Amino acid sequence: MLYFIAPYLERFWGPFRLLRSHALLLSAGTFLAAFAVLFLLPKLWRFSPHDHGKAILGPDGMKSAGKPTGTGLWVSLLVLPIVLLVMPLSGPVLGMVLCLYMAMAFGYLDDRAVEPWGQLKKGLLDAAVCIGVAVFLFSTLEGRMWVPFFAKGPLPGGAWMLPWWIYVPVAAFVLFLSMNTTNCSDGVDGLAGSLSLISLAALAVFLYTVTGYRPMANYLLVTHNYLAVRWAILLMTVAGGFAGYLWWNAEPSKALMGDAGSRFLGLLVGTGVMVTENPFLILAFAPVVLVNGGGGLVKILLLRALRKCGLEVRPPSMLEPEEEKRKNVIVKLLQSVRFPLHDQCKKNLKWSNSQVLVRFVLMQAFLMPLLFVLLVKIR
């Protein structure tokens, strides 16, 4: 809003022209959101439901019992007026923001439900939201997409113009993957929030300095979109808000964001990746989240494929000792690893929550620039 009213305010006082500076709006949004959440969240989380803990995980699983959960609702609501204030919005962008908040609302309702929603119900709602975002992305980006390792295409930056029936399913898959892997990573204090914060900040830098800046886009042989800087404002404003939340979520946490926050963050990271016009960059901007949260899905698919090949894939608890000894070595290896991967690190490697957080953050910080070079520079 400030961007559009700046020309009128400038008539009364010249410095108001700075409100058309994307750098100023990005900085203002980040700090306003951070301080708003930092100071107001403790006053709001008393209205949130309380976590019941997870007895199946033992003593660690019960540490969260009694803490306010679903506070992602309050974080996202506190961020919303700041987003509307600092980000220049258009119709499709408003539609995408609406879908983000629908994903948050579905997560919050699941947090509040006495009986947690089933996987089918959550999956269908997630798919509907992701398809909605994909449709709005197509109307904004017109189906442009470039891929790693190849710099030649019919459009500038080596891009291709995809029809909607290809673009929308590809975008929806990336969004669905990002949202659900982030949700699965929300099991250690500060983990999903910290990893998502790194992803959002890195995406904002890329959108502002590469996609939104023609000389750099031309140098790296990628597509240029001057509107990408506006998405950088959104990403950094939300990052600021969740930085304020992480102040209270640091171990031992005082509040949990629940599905309301993790689904919101995951969908936003996926949306930011699609705005870069290269869906493969999800590998560079969220590598640890994908492995941590998505490894379980790969494990399930592999075990089902091995079962169709006639191998015994039932868990050890369902087998006699002799049957377990005869089990295929590949099946044993797959079943020896727990997912999400942070459970493997806690239960089998005996890492503390703090060790999981710091080491996962370090891995993401080191992997991101390496994968970025491979997927962007080498073309």
Image (cartoon, rainbow, N blue to C red):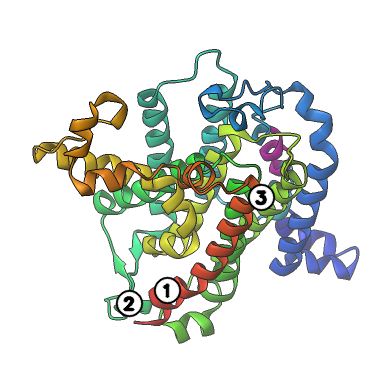
Sequence-first tag of 1 and 2? 2
Of residue 289 and residue 272, the one placed in the foreground of this image is 289
> According to the image, label 3 marks what residue?
354
Amino acid type indicated by mark 2: Gly
Does 8 sit left or right of 353 as displayed?
A: right
Q: Residue at x 79, y 56 (%)?
A: 31
Q: Residue at x 32, y 70 (%)?
A: 147
Compute the Cα span from label 3 to label 1. Answer: 40 Å
Amino acid type indicated by mark 3: Ser
Sequence-first tag of 3 and 2? 2
> According to the image, label 2 marks what residue?
158
The location of residue 165, given as percent across then percent down, is: 24, 49
Compute the Cα span from label 1 to label 2. Answer: 7 Å
Residues rendered magenta in the picture: 74-80
> According to the image, label 1 marks what residue?
223
- Residue 112 inside the magenta-drawn segment: no
Q: Is mark 2 on a helix, strand or loop?
A: helix
